[in-house]
Image (cartoon, grey):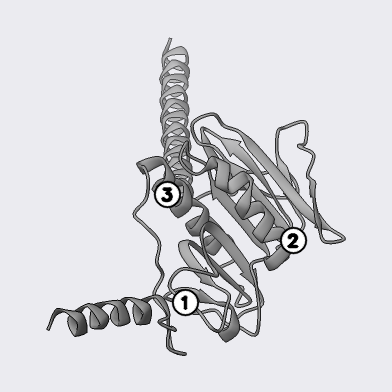
Amino acid sequence: MSEPATLEIISDRVLEDEVIFPPGDILSDEPPFESDLHRDQIDLLIRILKLWWRERQDFYASGNLTIYYSPNQKKSENFRGLDFFVVLAPQKKDRKSWVVWQEDGKYPNLIVEILSSSTAAVDKGLKKQVYQDTFSTPDYCWFDPATMELQGFHLVDGKYQEIQLTTDGRLWSQQLELYLGVYEGKLRFFTTENQLILSSEELAEQERLRAEQAEERVQQAEERAQQAEQEIARLRRFCVYRAST
């Protein structure tokens, strides 16, 4: 009686290893964020780029999401989890994951990995090789929020060439036509004029400061007007006094 049960268990394990995902939507298979730094950094990049490109309909930006790139997808092979990536010219919509064979074969145009002590070796080694040889992703860079290490690569003739940092310590992304650089301990986007691209919170704070400054200017103008009226009144009293003496 025990032998058939054993064979059944073995058969189930084989089937589990050979499960092929259905052709529909595939859920992302990414683990939880390693730290607040990682979560906040990825979220910041996504929110700022979406805000900056809010009028555009030809891109997809996401993070901590799985990219599946084999149509015969098995549970244990041919997928990668990316911290932050941008694909240009797809249909702009929400997705559960990025499934290459359902996206006209499109791979990311830009990938950013946020390093940690447990992932740095893979991000700098195996993943870099996959992004170069399989994805052919034009721009790849990594950032370490603990050490502020920032390094980038651009694909030239199928091989990654290191992108030289500017004198301000920034990387130029040909795909985004933006700079990436460190500002107040976070990886941020900068315009071609080297202007920091603000988040929605920073824009709101900037607007609040402008409103406060405008109100201060109005108050100062009112005070000057009152002082002028007081001076005019004083001069009138003085003239009346002189005329009466």
**Residue at coordinates 61% horizontally, 33% vertically from top-left?**
149
| Residue in front for this viewpoint, 88 or 140 | 140
The answer to whether one can see residue 212 in this image is: yes
Whole-percent x, y for residue 85 in the image: 57, 61
Find residue 74 and name its label: 1
Q: How many C-alpha atoms fall within 10 Å of the one at disc 2: few (<14), some, or many (≥20)? A: many
Q: Which residue in the structure is indicated by mark 2?
A: 138
**Residue at coordinates 43% horizontally, 80% vertically from top-left?**
18
Whole-percent x, y for residue 165 in the image: 76, 37
Whole-percent x, y for residue 168 in the image: 72, 32
The answer to whether one can see residue 200 in this image is: no
Labels 2 and 1 touching (C-beta < 8 A):
no
- Determine whether, in the image, residue 224 is placed left or right of residue 141: left
Work out how far the residue at label 2 is from the one at label 1, CA to CA, in angstroms.
Answer: 27 Å
**Residue occupying the far top of the picture:** 245
**Residue at coordinates 75% horizontally, 46% vertically from top-left?**
193
Nearer the observer: mark 2 or 1; the answer is: 1
**The residue under label 1 is which amino acid type?**
Lys
In primary-sequence order, the first of circles 2 and 3 is 2
- Determine whether, in the image, residue 76 is placed left or right of residue 180: left
**The residue under label 3 is which amino acid type?**
Glu
Q: Which residue in the structure is indicated by mark 3?
A: 201
Tell me the SS state at disc 2. Answer: loop
**Residue at coordinates 61% horizontally, 54% vertically from top-left?**
127
| Residue in front for this viewpoint, 132 or 195 | 132
Tell me the SS state at disc 1. Answer: loop
Work out how far the residue at label 1 is from the one at label 3, CA to CA, in angstroms.
Answer: 42 Å
